[in-house]
Image (cartoon, rainbow, N blue to C red):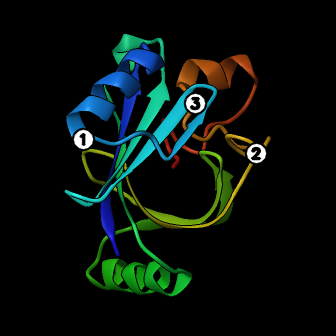
Amino acid sequence: MSRLQLALNVTDLDAAIEHYSTLFGTSPAKIKPGYANFAIAQPPLKLVLIQNDHAEHGSINHLGVEVESRDEVAAEHARVTGAGLAAMVEGETTCCYAVQDKFWVEGGPTQFEIYTVLAPAEVMHETESSCCASVDAAAAADAEPVAAGRCC
């Protein structure tokens, strides 16, 4: 099953979890420090909440589509690039407390990823990445962001 992903920046993670739990009638599939996600069956949606205390970053962190397999990631990459869109392959990476295989569609008004989850992970991101971190947090850690807000 494929589903749309919506990753939101939130200033109060607990309040956002309560709100979206009520709205969609389900509890989060995963809660970690500064992060939560919902695997919503109806409508098919992966809702990701990312703690971000900087309102100037807006509420949408990024969009994406979660697919079931690496083969689907590869097929979507071939389709997207075959249609003339630029893509940045991130490949296998640890992000949002999961090992994922992914690529990013470049050039749109909102960052957009196509990915599959390979396994759970105990960390938000690899140490050399700034997955889902705010630009300010990445700068404070002397990390180069993959791109502002890229992740999940």
Check disc 3 and report its element: helix, strand or loop. Answer: loop
Q: Quadrant of the N terminus?
A: bottom left
Q: Residue at x 49, y 47 (%)?
A: 29
Point out residue 139 in the picture as x, y percentages from the top left corner.
Answer: 66, 21
Check disc 1 and report its element: helix, strand or loop. Answer: helix
Disc on res. 24: 1
Between the C-alphas of marks 3 and 2, the distance is 16 Å
Residue ID for mark 3: 133
**Would you say the residues marked 3 and 2 are in contact, meaning their CB atoms lie under 8 Å apart?**
no
Question: Sequence order check: which comes first, mark 2 or mark 1?
Answer: 1
Residue ID for mark 2: 122
Amino acid type of the residue tagged 2 in the rendering:
Glu
User: Of the residues tagged 2 and 1, which is closer to the observer?
Assistant: 1
Above-or-below relation of 39 to 96: below
* Image quadrant where residue 101 sits: bottom right
Q: Residue at x 42, y 79 (%)?
A: 77
**In the depicted view, which residue is nearer to us: 4 or 89?**
4
Q: Is residue 97 left or right of residue 38?
A: right
Amino acid type of the residue tagged 1 in the rendering:
Phe
Q: Is residue 43 left or right of residue 119?
A: left
Q: Residue at x 30, y 32 (%)?
A: 20
